Image: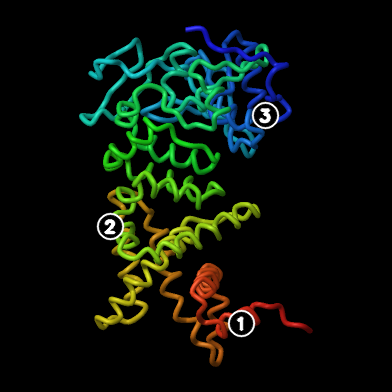
Amino acid sequence: MEPTVVKRADHNVSRKNISSAAVKVLYHLKDEGYTAYLAGGGVRDLLLNRNPKDFDVATNATPEQIRKLFRNCRLVGRRFRLAHILFRGEVIETSTFRAPVPEDADDTVHCENTFRTADSGQVMRDNIFGTPEEDALRRDFTINALFYNIADFSVIDYAGGLEDLEQKMIRVIGDPDKRFAEDPVRMIRAARFAGTLGFEIEQGAYDSICRNKDLLRHAAPSRMYEEVQKLFFCGHAKEVFHWLEKTDLLHPMFHDFSHWIDEDKTRHDWVIHALDQMDRWRKAGLQVHPALLFALIFGEYHEYLIQQLVEAGQSHLDAARNAVHGHLKGMCENVRVPKNVIYQVSDIMGNQQRFERTKGRRPQRFMQSRGFLDAFLYFKISSKAHNRNQELLEYWNEMRQPKKS
């Protein structure tokens, strides 16, 4: 298959917009006689005049050959053997061109490389090296299968990604049912790209997601935790959430929570309000840690659970701890939330009652405690969202103002 090759004069990708570390890797590989391409999302974002979050390199050099070329390199991964080339403050992920999944889906051995699938069709290990064309066609979506060739500064398209960029379309490479079975997380990625880029999901892929959403139970819970953070830390969390709802991916991801929302559509408003706030923080360049993210997204649901336990006779502190731990630990079957994050969310919710205690030295002691700021951010956002505790909020805002000398 002959690719579409766009010469330098006919596209907008410039080396000045690529990280200097990635350029060094590309040139070093090229100068040593290897093919070296900037690959995937970095090329997509540069073509869309967006700032890529990272720059990935694809090459015909094997991981061992890459390691010999770069002293600042370490090899990682089992399913995909990758080279991480380490620079100060940046990691350039460098992969060897890979071949597509074998049609027979049996365990195979190809030279020193292995391929293995689970019974569900999910790829568990895949280190079969291939050509640039094969590598492009085994990627998830056409817009992520574009290459930038450092040798002549051209953009190379084997999968029709340039046309889909023009049409603002998320299109799966190959049969969507098969590709989602290989890696169910691709369905979540489709929703993230659609929400982040403002694209549509091609109808065949959309129908396949709706049909195969329950395959998410086969995805590794630890990887799902990483993907959830990408979904809601992308700066377009509200739009991404819209696609998760539209494709019904929300149910297999957050089973109890999503059904609770379905019971009363007004509960949906809190989630949108929380995600709106998350997007504003991200656009302002603020870092938000996972505990505050989960506290905000599930806040109203946790308040509901806490109230039920309080009415059953538990103290507010015990109810907060039991409600949060019960929900988030149960969710770990699908999304493995780390224990320290669960404890931090529990502290945020358990501390909410302390904002009602304004007598004596309690406010000062509370403000000096480690979890105060996160608890206050939740209190402030929830107070404004529900138009409640306005006097208390004003009191705590004044308490946080620096004292005039």
Type of amino acid at the residue the image marks with label 2: Gly
Separation (CA) of disc 2 from disc 3: 42 Å
Q: Are marks 1 and 2 in contact (CB under 8 Å)?
A: no
Q: Which mark is residue 18?
A: 3
Q: Is residue 265 above or below residue 382?
A: above
Find residue 113 and report its horizontal and vertical position in percent.
Answer: 35, 16
Local secondary structure at mark 3? loop
Q: Residue 288: which quarter of the image?
A: bottom right
Q: Which mark is residue 330?
A: 2
Separation (CA) of disc 1 from disc 3: 47 Å
Q: Is residue 307 above or below residue 299?
A: below
How busy is the neighbourhood of tag 2: few (under 14 within 10 Å), some, or many (20 plus)? some
Find residue 70 and report its horizontal and vertical position in percent.
Answer: 58, 22
Precedes in sequence: disc 1 or disc 3: 3
Q: Is residue 338 visible?
A: yes
Q: Is residue 85 visible?
A: no
Identify the residue position indicated by label 1 in the image.
Answer: 394
Separation (CA) of disc 1 from disc 2: 37 Å
Find residue 67 and report its horizontal and vertical position in percent.
Answer: 52, 21
Type of amino acid at the residue the image marks with label 1: Glu
Local secondary structure at mark 1? helix
Precedes in sequence: disc 1 or disc 2: 2
Residue farthest to the right, as pictured: 405
Q: Is residue 176 above or below residue 259?
A: above
Local secondary structure at mark 2? helix
How busy is the neighbourhood of tag 1: few (under 14 within 10 Å), some, or many (20 plus)? few
